[in-house]
Amino acid sequence: MNMILSNPDYDSTNLEEFKNIWVFCEQRGGQMMPTTYELISEGRKLADQLGVKLCGLLLGENVDGLAKDLGGYGADEVILCEHPLLKTYTTDAYAKVICDTISWMKPEVFLIGATNIGRDLGPRCAARLHTGLCADCTHLDIDLDLYKAFLHEASTLPAERIDGLGTAKVLGKDHDISRDLKMTRPAFGGNLMASIICPRFRPAMATVRPGVLKKAAYDEAKAKAISVTRFSVELSEDDLATEVLEVVKAAKKLVDLVGADYVVSVGRGISTDVEGGIKLAEELADVLGGVVGGSRVAIDSGWLTSDHQVGQTGKTVHPKVYVALGISGSIQHQAGMKESECIVAVNKNEGAPIFDIADYGICGDLFKVTPMLIEAVKAAKAAK
Amino acid sequence: MDFNLSREYQLLRKMMAEFTENEVKPIAAETDRTCTYPKENIDKLFELGVMGICVPKEYGGVGADPLASAICIEELSKQCASTGDIVATHNGLCCDPILMHGTDEQKAKYLPMLTTGRKVGAFCLTEPNAGSDASKGTTEAKLEGDHYVLNGSKVFITNGYVAEVFVVFAMTDKSKGTRGISAFIVESSFPGFSVGKHEQKMGLHGSPTAEIVFQDCIVPKENLLGQEGKGFKIAMQTLDGGRIGIAAQALGIAEGAMDEAKAYVKTREQFGRPISKFQNTQFVLADMEMGNEAGRLLTYQAAARKAAGQPYTKEAAIAKLWCSEHAMKTTTKALQMFGGYGYTQDYPMERMMRDAKITEIYEGTSEIQRVVISNNIGL
Amino acid sequence: MKILVCVKQVPDTSGKIAVNPDGTLNRASMQTIINPDDMNAVEAALKLKDETGCPVYAVTMGPPPAESMLRELMAMGCDGSYLVSGREFGGSDTYATSQILAAALDTIGIEEDDILFCGRQAIDGDTAQVGPQIAEKLHIPQVTYAADIHKDGNTVTVRRMLEDGYMTIKVKTPCLITCIKELNTPRYMSVAGIFGAWQRPMTVLDYEALKDNALIDKSTIGLSGSPTNILTSFTPPQKGAGRMLEGNNMATCEKLASILAEKHYL
């Protein structure tokens, strides 16, 4: 395993040498992961705030055809690293190529989707490049005024404190934060938020939670104008300590919670009749045109498979309507669904925290209420 | 003097609380409703070393003490008194007398069976006409060459139809009354052993209670436990220790009922506020807590005295009497707080109340405990 | 062969979260638990111990009270433990934490056929960074999101979960594997383990014990060794309470459906 950077003079503390915003463009089997386009769209805004280029870093074998779409969502340039050993993701090969590329081309910001692969790769690269990484971000800013506007909206910090932001104490000295990437992320299940900066090292690295950032409109002209730079990859079998024996796609189509407009989730409340509860949720989801999700309890108890999980350790959803059936609404669960446009909660317990965030609450037995709700929604839709 | 449990016991309680929450609580209502012996959980308790917890390491146990056993029974009983009962009987009424009175050969043969061998144990004393008065027992044991022949039947035997090792009391000399009673170790595979009627009980539905019938049951001579004629003493000593287990079981029931009630009154609103805000509710819960605290101190004290080899007959009787009567009172009052809901099977209160009642009856009724206590205060 | 498991004591965030007026977590008022994913890592290690008889050691960085967690892990079956603890280590972010832990693991000594286990991520930070960064700093390969593990001689075959399936990965020891809850069900402490937990060794590794390791330098640990800084920490505003609909009958459901239709949610 070769972990030595190919640029021997690389120094992550020479901040002024670093320029441009990069996005790791994760593809699997030649298919671009959707979160890449979210990152490109967000990266475009950040690059404009800094007045620099947005580059997509694309690794794989015979993947140059993917470059155009990256342009369509806002990339100026794609840095293409192709090699047979990059066909399938391995930590060793990807970390080596990415770190080598960065050591020569020195971006100031490097964004990675917080997928299972991104979260494997990000920390490994940050350690090798000796820089900071903020994991699983839900919001990014560079422009200070935009960041302040975000805090006014999304935090309970006093207005004067927000308006007074401009420097941060870094190792005892005042540091101007105006050009730093401000990476905001939830901690403790979303009850606490933190904005992180990486003031002394570059690139500032972040993994970003899939499904949180919005994809921009596709721009055909920009797609056509994309420029591709090939980076010559030096890689051999000796660089790999791991061997991928097989890659298996789940046979069952996993539920697409993140993209769903309607999510009907079940929690502990169905424990008295798990099958019946899930059936009701499925019926309601069918009527609405959505999918079924579950709280952590529903997944940990084995009632639903983990691809159904909504919450801090599961997926973040923002459907038009989120229906919580028998979910008390722990803070972990709320972290994954509170950005839904409209939240409907059905729970026996009047004091359930879910009612604190629900737009509409019905206090009652889900096994009695849900069938009626299914009928009512059917009727309302038919009347349209 | 330090009234805190030492760190090992605290950690044991934590482990048992986790086990009870994850393994026992989810099936407690079902166990009760379907009268099912919770075999999987008992197997897990064997694996963890809870079954036969006091058996020394050389015999396959973990070498803990009666206090450890009491803590395990208490925690299990918070959610399922049946599970607590099965453990209490196995540890206190089967492993314990063999450990105390068995020969080296008996210990080497039977204690590993009751620990690593995962065979459940039971205790056969009560007969249809001999409950509190054991001297009226009619089960007989006759020595014939190298074996005894047992005839008679025993009733209300906890673990009856799942146990494989039984400590059985039988008359070897009827003319001597209690001095004619002897104790035996009987395996369920011995010829002439059979299980009779399975009892339908008010509570403890997960605890397998049955009649045990001996019809010319052949018991090898070397399975005599202690000396001939010393059976009554062995039985009384065993019950002294067993009472600590029942005290712990009753204590657990009371604590479990109080936990449920406390959680419920905080969420249940009447007249515009949670009923926990009414002093009437608070005072009842305060009394429950007082009784629980007393129960803990009494039970742990009795267990600690037994562990230290000090006399504990009176202390065990007091602990058992206090905790069982307190459990009955507490479950009744806790159910009342739930109102109509408490009376339904949607909540565990009615089960806890049914389960509590037996603790005032078995291993010596409340009346017998008062006899034991008065005998021990110089009357 | 031996197994080292990295674990963390975390505040129990499943209940109510206590937050100080300045927006930081009030750790003192919260119960601590062993990080749930780390329990799966411990179980994976103990399973291998059951199969091979190799010793298992738990390693944690934290304040002295983290000893209670290590005792619990020894009650589960770990043969010994290491508590990496020192004032100098305070204020470390994930980079500096992995630096210190890597130094500690290096000091303990990693041999050819050893395996390191970590949990996927800790519930307090949810970063999932320390495992891979330890592996990088120890120059050993990593496999994250392990849902199945088989050891055969000096190779380990791991089923690594992806969002849409899995990969089967073969890796040579020594290696670091991060574990997810699908991997196994953690065992309980045993009674024998509990009564033996204080007889098993717990070694404290403080700054003095680690300072000669090549990874340890004032500029690589603690605040000064942390590339990231917290700019602000804050609580999000509570979403305005919605409305409880009256009743729970058909009329209630019709009312809700008509509101949803009116607001174009249907």
Image (cartoon, helix red, strand yellow):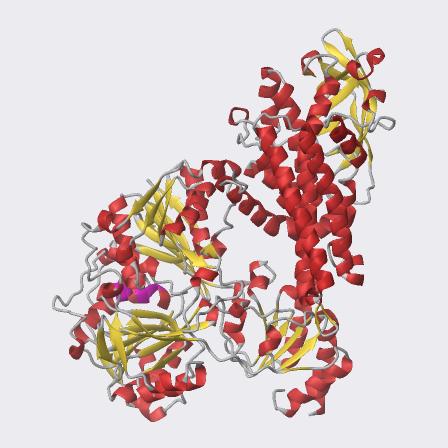
Query: In screen coordinates, is C218 left or right of B15?
Result: left
Q: Kindly give the residue lying farthest to the top in the view shown.
A: B145
Whether residue A121 is in magenta: the answer is yes
Give the prevailing secondary structure in the magenta stretch.
helix
Residue at image point 66% right, 78% down: A361
Q: Position of residue B153 (x, y in %)?
A: 83, 25
Q: Nearer the viewer, residue A364 or B54?
A: B54
Q: Position of residue B2 (x, y in %)?
A: 52, 40
Query: In screen coordinates, is B39 left or right of A299?
Result: right
Q: Is residue A127 visible?
A: yes
Whether residue B279 is in magenta: the answer is no
Residue at image point 36% right, 84% down: A162
Q: Is residue A381 visible?
A: no
Q: Kindly give the residue lying farthest to the front in the view shown.
A: B378
Q: Is residue B379 above or below residue C103?
A: above
* Number of numbered discs: 0
Query: In screen coordinates, is C254 left or right of A245?
Result: right
For the C terminus of chain C, the image quarter is bottom right
Q: Position of residue A247 (x, y in %)?
A: 41, 61
The image quarter containing residue B210 is top right
